[in-house]
Image (tube, coloured by chain):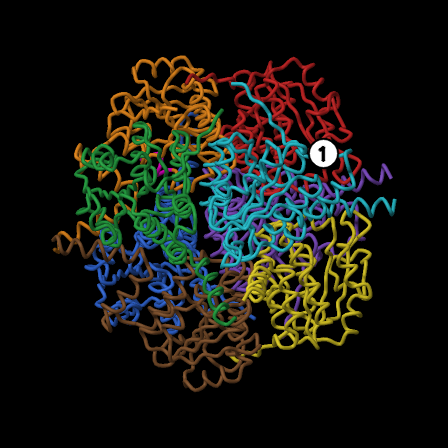
Chain colours: A green, B orange, C blue, D red, E purple, F brown, G cyan, H yellow
Amino acid sequence: MSFTYNRLDKNDVALLMVDHQAGLLSLVRDFSPDDFKNNVLALADIAKFFDIPTILTTSFETGPNGPIVPELKEMFPQAPYFARPGQINAWDNEEFVAAIKATGKKQLLIAGVVTEVCVAFPVLSALEEGYEVFVVTDASGTFNQTTRDAAWDRMSQAGAQLMTWFAVGGELHRDWRNDIEGFGGLLAGHLPAYANLMQSYSQQNQLG
Amino acid sequence: MSFTYNRLDKNDVALLMVDHQAGLLSLVRDFSPDDFKNNVLALADIAKFFDIPTILTTSFETGPNGPIVPELKEMFPQAPYFARPGQINAWDNEEFVAAIKATGKKQLLIAGVVTEVCVAFPVLSALEEGYEVFVVTDASGTFNQTTRDAAWDRMSQAGAQLMTWFAVGGELHRDWRNDIEGFGGLLAGHLPAYANLMQSYSQQNQLG
Amino acid sequence: MSFTYNRLDKNDVALLMVDHQAGLLSLVRDFSPDDFKNNVLALADIAKFFDIPTILTTSFETGPNGPIVPELKEMFPQAPYFARPGQINAWDNEEFVAAIKATGKKQLLIAGVVTEVCVAFPVLSALEEGYEVFVVTDASGTFNQTTRDAAWDRMSQAGAQLMTWFAVGGELHRDWRNDIEGFGGLLAGHLPAYANLMQSYSQQNQLG
Amino acid sequence: MSFTYNRLDKNDVALLMVDHQAGLLSLVRDFSPDDFKNNVLALADIAKFFDIPTILTTSFETGPNGPIVPELKEMFPQAPYFARPGQINAWDNEEFVAAIKATGKKQLLIAGVVTEVCVAFPVLSALEEGYEVFVVTDASGTFNQTTRDAAWDRMSQAGAQLMTWFAVGGELHRDWRNDIEGFGGLLAGHLPAYANLMQSYSQQNQLG
Amino acid sequence: MSFTYNRLDKNDVALLMVDHQAGLLSLVRDFSPDDFKNNVLALADIAKFFDIPTILTTSFETGPNGPIVPELKEMFPQAPYFARPGQINAWDNEEFVAAIKATGKKQLLIAGVVTEVCVAFPVLSALEEGYEVFVVTDASGTFNQTTRDAAWDRMSQAGAQLMTWFAVGGELHRDWRNDIEGFGGLLAGHLPAYANLMQSYSQQNQLG
Amino acid sequence: MSFTYNRLDKNDVALLMVDHQAGLLSLVRDFSPDDFKNNVLALADIAKFFDIPTILTTSFETGPNGPIVPELKEMFPQAPYFARPGQINAWDNEEFVAAIKATGKKQLLIAGVVTEVCVAFPVLSALEEGYEVFVVTDASGTFNQTTRDAAWDRMSQAGAQLMTWFAVGGELHRDWRNDIEGFGGLLAGHLPAYANLMQSYSQQNQLG
Amino acid sequence: MSFTYNRLDKNDVALLMVDHQAGLLSLVRDFSPDDFKNNVLALADIAKFFDIPTILTTSFETGPNGPIVPELKEMFPQAPYFARPGQINAWDNEEFVAAIKATGKKQLLIAGVVTEVCVAFPVLSALEEGYEVFVVTDASGTFNQTTRDAAWDRMSQAGAQLMTWFAVGGELHRDWRNDIEGFGGLLAGHLPAYANLMQSYSQQNQLG
Amino acid sequence: MSFTYNRLDKNDVALLMVDHQAGLLSLVRDFSPDDFKNNVLALADIAKFFDIPTILTTSFETGPNGPIVPELKEMFPQAPYFARPGQINAWDNEEFVAAIKATGKKQLLIAGVVTEVCVAFPVLSALEEGYEVFVVTDASGTFNQTTRDAAWDRMSQAGAQLMTWFAVGGELHRDWRNDIEGFGGLLAGHLPAYANLMQSYSQQNQLG
């Protein structure tokens, strides 16, 4: 069978951040809280860095689910933002889908909480409508590893591609020369092990 | 390839609970007993909440396999109930299949013990007959993680969708506004972490 | 060296439940939520069953830490209850300690959230004052396994005994004949695997 | 897409046991030695129970790889047995393939050590020749979990079905009534947890 | 501080097997069923091999806890056997303690189900009476790893020594020359990896 | 035996940060990089918050071990800082020990990389000199879990107390009323799960 | 569906080693450092043994990513070697692709660091161009297990085959008789457990 | 209580390597084979580097236990070497103990296979005779983690100190200046992650 590599294209992609809310985050247990916070903010930084149209949505944010993570709101003050009145699948919210279509992009990056509902449902809906869908798995969290495994399988079998924020960044950037300083800084800010490499390198250059 | 998202539809789905028996449950070791009991009862509550036709079946319930979990029997007193005389694959029991067909549904939720036999066999049979099949993976248990992984792979490759009870609930409910109180109560009853969110929220409202 | 086995004595023991609050519970990740809820309620049921003086305390319950788990409040409506105005170590609260001393008991069962602070601090204080201290480890939770391991080591080295709710129940009951029905029911309510044994046994007796 | 459930048929299946040799077994670390020994012998017992044509093969059995597990040799004294002179993929051994073809079966159960070589290679060869191939995953072992995961994925993607010995037994037996005593004994011999159920049941019947 | 190595002495040790019953075994989840069955029978074989006085006891064996594992009863037909009428701590049963004292031994090997109750309670009682106590940890099982860790800590801090069946065998045997064939056979029967070594060795000697 | 609870006292404690260097951090694998970075910075923030005398030291910082983590240097610009010329045990560096003694404190908090060397050696030296030593285990890292377990055991048996940064903060602060805002902010900055609680609480108050 | 087994053919395969650099290796945490080093060198030895055209490439080797692992450079002194000026996907480097095409091979073995970027991107590009692609999963490393799982799924769904170095060696060698000594030596050098088998065998032959 | 830090002293320590034999190594499953081989050889290199008297012993090396690991024999051609005729506890072999006493050292490093027998027994015997005993835990292996945990606890409670090869090296070397090149080379040879640091550093110096 022939295979087409639909690479992420920074000019043809939009990001959907679904239900990263303070209350719902307390349910996430397939990542440590430090790791998960870092992953979500890294994805947000990537979207800023590449100027990717980003759409935010929440579910019952004035109830137990709690407010959206404040850092996200601050990072995307102009982004379309939909506080859904009740739809569990964000794709059932007409304004949300209209905003996606308004971007004119055919690739969608999707992340959210919890994986098997808030992520998987719009992923499947978007696939049905013909979008190329990329799940940012490590910026999406849920109750436990078993639930995650089932959700990943369902999305993968439907045709979604499973990625992580670092792979998204690399596939969008394509060439370090497009902005060495900027991309390096982005990585250092979210990969302590890479920041360590840069610090050792930098000191030695000063000493050398 | 084009993809069709066959969403769970509360008007077109039936639930099959296969061999959740006291003896067989002692074999389940891919979940803690507390987690597994909670998952099975959560699935049952979902079926009640959405009024989904539910069919129960057991294998040799007067022998070592033991009686059906009493909570299930109490929750579904009117449900078709088939104590199979010997068939390992419940689908080989004609009355069981007849009851399924009598529901007129084309989507099947299937859960049971043990996963690779009591779940996988009817899953594969139902797929062959053209049903859309959704495995409720966390209400299905078996001997260990290795066995589960193999069983999931076999069912997934055959076309079954791997879900968990929470995803089933969300996909059936579709919109919180259909019954906020009811659905919230269902979640709180089976997700202690969500119940905590609701309690914090509720107290603050009283204090506020 | 000679060893004295200071067995738990239902006539000489009090239970301290420290900071089992809805908000703080969201921090607990060394147990699954289902397991932890079950463990805490099992311990409470044991205290009720053996009529053990129980003292409740909370930390900032009108703030983010949230209200006490409602089941605990309902189970111990008459219990001394101290909403501490700020002391992190409950033992620094004079009313709390006075209530403990008022029980006249020399053995203390202590459980709480989070283990290395809300449990460990009063455990060490109580040891210093000469109490025999028994930590109910599985009704005490914290951020992760590493934190728990460190906290257990500190308490154990200081002389506290590490127990779990089932061991507490068995050591207090001593002989099934003291109340077979009651104690069996308590176990069945919190050990699904034991409930399964009882159901298989019970059915067979009816059939036999 | 339509799906055909090619169920294991005891009249149309052969079993290939590949390189279960004393030396090679020391390399297996994705199962505990007790579990793995039990799984291999359980599979062998199933073959005996259902009278399934079984073919044994070994690789360099007079060298470091060591002799075939003695229990297998004793259980299948009449089985075709091929000590391969050098072929790594058993399917490259013409006598081995001839013996398979001589059985006239179209379904193959394959197990061996190590999974990614001694199992995966003949699995892929057999698939290419049109056989329906079922990997008995828990009677196949290798160096570690990572290696196993990769090998399972390769075989599954090629069309092999991943099973475990218990699922094989159940799918072949189909109905307990075909031989309750025999099949129950087989399970009890290899599932200590099931043997426990039978003993509790049996005693109670004697007492009842 | 000075240390005295109280080695296990086959002439001065007795073995207590506490509550290895079919029902209770279904609760054990800190070992795989295959591993645990092997460990218990290995310990029993060691007792037979060294002719160590062995005492069996059970708790409510005609109820849900179920009958003693039949292999144990067959292996020790003459052993003192106490079906306790209700005492949870076997040491509270006077006949049981009298039988222990009648052996005249000062070292005790103790194993049982579940670890934190049926093992830990008599371990602590025996320590208090001045016995040297050795817990056979891998022939003792319980609900989960957390419970085990707490129970081990309590027993270790009280002065019990934590051992495993293989260490017990080695410390009792002391010198292979006391019975090479016998001890080697015992190991081979319970250590599949060691049996593999012996088979490779044996074949090569025949070929050599 | 009597026990004295030597509580951490903010007026009688000093902090030693040993070898948190960019190169050495690449060796730490018993924590995820995100978790470890957070733990180290949380400990540093605690020292700042309570104005605890802090002493920094490094090993060969101009070689492969790399420079000290830049955040630490920025946070403690005035702290005594010893770039050791070769001593592996920092306590063998006379200036380092002199600086410790100059603080006049009798309690020491120690953290570093790697645990079994850079932490354990000065811990044991300090214990020998009569200090009360508290290991901040989660701000200390090493190659793997096995190495950590051995190092913890050695330090604990010698009399060191195993703590974590959150326990250190709580034991130093003692009473929230000493500075609710400050301490809450410190926790929120390093415990994403606690920050979530505060955000939910805060929003609701605004809405209420 | 029909399946074609495209076996690795030593005459039709090339190996791509992507970004095995000293700095990047510090990011790899889904393998222990000992295991990963061994896996990478084993793959290199296989390429040497079978005389497979090997192409090396690095990313910013004079920056923080660090120099290529020196053993690789020494083993392949004549191999095409491309220090990419900035392309993240090595396939975007025209010289690299030209060198691959110059080999005239249609099968590609690919390994590198990190898996989801440096491996996955060229894997997908090569698949698109019609190559048969085999990922050497255990000579490819990344940040953690979650990231690896996502990367494997993406590559597998696109049609890449997931292998490990031992499977690669076996599939290339096909028959031990092609060079028993050489292949055995290769295995012994990288599989300590196999070396042990050979040593036991060898000694016994000398003694025999 | 006062504590004395008995540091490892290169002039007062001997190393005992017990039963690192090819056959017995196949039983070790608490380390990966790569890791364990590396740990054992690292310990041997340390003994060579510091010129520590080393004593080797084996158990039945002409039988299934197999020959001593050849690298050890080559590294210590002049070392006292005792092929024990049957004693399981090496300390029961008079020549072995005589050789230890002949060294005149009062500190003993002990490593071996399997941990709970071949290591623990001589450890306890040596403690009884007043030696300071240091277990090199990561150069000692056994069947599984449970067995290891029990063995570590027994040795630790008796007064042995649990170390790892890297800690041993650091405590013996004390100061890098004693031999920077030599000690650095030793670490680089056994810590791939440290070798990576050195390579990055070295290249940059050449480029700088």
Q: What residue type is disc 1 on?
A: Val
Q: Nearer the viewer, residue H131 or E1?
A: H131
Asked if residue E167 can be seen in this view, the reply is: yes
How far across and down, in percent of the image, does residue A81 sit?
Answer: 20, 44
Q: Is residue E103 above or below residue D55?
A: below
Q: Quadrant of residue B49?
A: top left
Horizontal side of H66 relative to C153 (left or right) equals right
Q: Nearer the viewer, residue F58 or C182?
A: F58
Q: Is residue H58 above or below residue D178?
A: below
Which residue is found at the position 48% from the left and 36% from the top? G124
* Placement of the N terminus of chain B among the 4 image quadrants: top left
How far across and down, in percent of the image, does residue B75 sit?
Answer: 29, 29
Q: Nearer the viewer, residue G170 or E6?
A: G170
Asked if residue C172 can be seen in this view, the reply is: no
Q: Is residue E103 above or below residue D153?
A: below
- Which chain letter matches label 1? D
Q: Is residue G96 magenta?
A: no
How far across and down, in percent of the image, does residue C194 sit?
Answer: 42, 40
Magenta region:
B37-42
Q: Which residue is mark 1?
A: D69
Q: For the stretch drawn in magenta, what is the main secondary structure?
A: helix
Horizontal side of H106 relative to B208 (left or right) equals right
